[in-house]
Amino acid sequence: MRKLFALAVALMYTALVHAQDLDDLRLLYRDATKSEEQAQAFYEPLAGVTRSDKPILVAYKGAGLMLLARYEKLAARGPKVKEAVPWIEQAIADEPQNAEIRLIRLSIQEHLPKFLKYNQNIETDRDFIQNALPSVEDAGLKAMINGYFDSFSTP
């Protein structure tokens, strides 16, 4: 019985730590557009993420690559964007019903220059996220979604 209790406590602690890490990552993502240093700080914990990791981390890594592309010389931006897109799209393919991953793609597509032609899912993602919002139970994610729509999204 003690072992079962210890295991339950350990699992709850792991889930809490993971949720805290995700909340921290969300805050870093929000601030990553402000400067190259903040973009680097956001990307740093994601540098070791592989495509076999959790889809949310794969999506955030793609977003980090995308944000770093902003600070490249103009000629290098296109290839950097092309490197980032498959990360985000794989995360969507792996978890198409994940509102957070869809929010990541929406935030990228809405603010990426149109000539880069990565903007075909804006309306679909916006509608999906708004429809999913009432059922989102994670308070941090709900705050992130509401904050994005209040401050950054262009209807």
Image (spheres, rainbow, N blue to C red):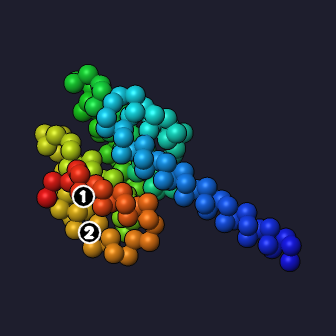
Residue 36 location in percent, x, y? 35, 28
Q: Are marks 1 and 2 in contact (CB under 8 Å)?
A: yes
User: What residue would you read off at disc 1?
Assistant: 149
**In this view, 63 is above or below 101:** above
> Is residue 93 among what the camera can see?
no
How many numbered dots are placed on residues in this image? 2
Mark 1 vs mark 2, foreground winner is 1
Relative to 93, 121 lies left or right:
left
Q: Residue at x 48, y 53 (%)?
A: 23
Quadrant of the drawing holding the C terminus: bottom left
Compute the Cα span from label 1 to label 2: 9 Å
Residue 99 location in percent, x, y? 36, 64
User: What residue would you read off at disc 2?
Assistant: 130
> Is residue 14 among what the camera can see?
yes
Decide: few, some or many residues near mark 1? Use Cα within 10 Å; few <14, some 14-19, many ≥20.
some
Relative to 132, 140 lies left or right:
right
Q: Residue furthest right?
A: 2
**In this view, 78 is above or below 86:** above
Which structural element holds mark 2?
Answer: helix
Residue 72 location in percent, x, y? 29, 25
Amino acid at dot 1? Phe
Amino acid at dot 2? Gln
Residue 117 location in percent, x, y? 17, 45
**In this view, 69 is above or below 148:** above
Q: Residue at x 36, y 50 (%)?
A: 88
Which structural element holds mark 1?
Answer: helix
Q: Residue at x 40, y 56 (%)?
A: 91
